[in-house]
Image (cartoon, grey):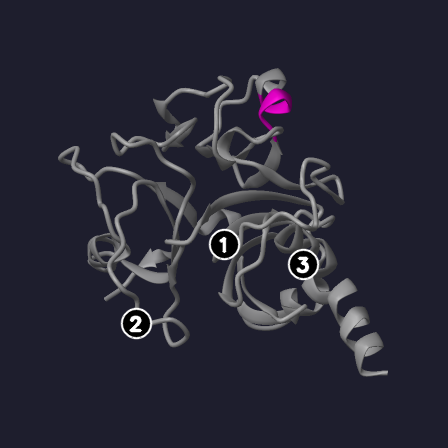
Amino acid sequence: MKKTVKFLTALCGFFVFSLQASYHSFTEADITYGIFQAKPEEVRLHWRDSEGKNYRSLTNLKRALEKNYQVKMIMNGGIYSQNDVPAGLWIENGQELNPLNTKRGHGNFHIQPNGVFALVGKQPYILTTKAYQQKKWKPTFALQSGPMLVINGKINPQFRPTLESYHKRNAVCLNKQNELFFILTTSGKPNLYTFSQGLQKMGCYNALYLDGTISNWYIPNQFNSFHWHHFVGMISVTSLEKTE
C-alpha cells in the first residue's frame, strides 16, 4: 500500500507542487530529488559579468544579484568546455554569446539527442537540438546541454539500466502543462537511466541534463551552505522587483 501511494503521488507530483511552495523533494529508488518550480519570467542565465569576467561560482553570482534583486535560486547551468566556455549554445538577453554545437564527440554533452532549454518571451521550451534548429527562434535566454533525458514523456533510448556511472546530477524539466522545474539529486547517485526514470515518474514530459558530480544550487532557507565549485554558465531565479 505504501508503494502505491508513493507511486500515485509521483504521477500527480508536479500538479501538487504547483499549488504549494516553490521547493519540494521526492524520493524514488533511494534517490532523493530536490525540485524547484520557477516562473519563466523570473529565470535568467549568467556567464560573464559586465566587465567580461566569468562569475565562476554560485557565491560570486549570488553577491552580484543580491545588490538589486531577491534571489530565489541559483544553479549551475549546462556542461562547459576546458577553456571555460559553454559546450554549446548560450544566449543572454537576446544576445548569442556562444553558437549552437552540432558536432559529434565524446562525453555526456554529445550523447544523442542533446538539446536546448530556451525562453522565448515568457514561454519555456525544452527540445532536441535538431528541433531547435528548425524553429528559427530568437530566444531571450537559451542554453544547450546534453543529453536529453526525457523526450515527449519517454526516456532517452540511448540509456541502459545497467550503466555503471553513478553521480550527483541536475536537470531542467517541463511537465505536460509546460510548468518549469529545476531538479538536483540531493541524496544518492543515479546513473542516467535511473535519473531519467525518476524525472519521468515525477511528471517530466521533456527534460534536459545539465551536469553531474559538481552540480549544486543555492536556495534560501533550504540550501544555504554550499562549497565552492568552478562553474561557467549558471541559472538564476530572482524576483522582478528590486529589494529595498
Q: Is residue 14 left or right of residue 232?
A: right
The percent coordinates of residue 78 (x first, y second) are 43, 41
Asked if the residues shown at circle 1 and circle 2 are in contact, with their CB atoms under 8 angstroms apart, the answer is no
The chief SS type of the magenta part is helix
Mark 3, Cα crowd under 10 Å, few <14 / some 14-19 / many 20+, is many
Which residue is labeled 1 in the image? 169
Q: CA distance from mark 1 to mark 2?
A: 18 Å
The percent coordinates of residue 128 (x first, y second) are 62, 29
Q: Which residues are magenta?
A: 128-132
Residue lying at the far bottom of the rendered structure: 1
Q: Earlier in the sequence, mark 2 or mark 3?
A: 3
Q: Earlier in the sequence, mark 1 or mark 2?
A: 1
Residue 198's mark?
3
Mark 1, Cα crowd under 10 Å, few <14 / some 14-19 / many 20+, is many
Asked if the residues shown at circle 3 and circle 1 are in contact, with their CB atoms under 8 angstroms apart, the answer is no
Residue 129 falls within the magenta-colored stretch = yes
- The amino acid beneath tag 1 is Arg
- The amino acid beneath tag 2 is Ser
The percent coordinates of residue 33 (x first, y second) are 57, 65
The percent coordinates of residue 189 (x first, y second) are 53, 61
Q: CA distance from mark 3 to mark 1?
A: 12 Å
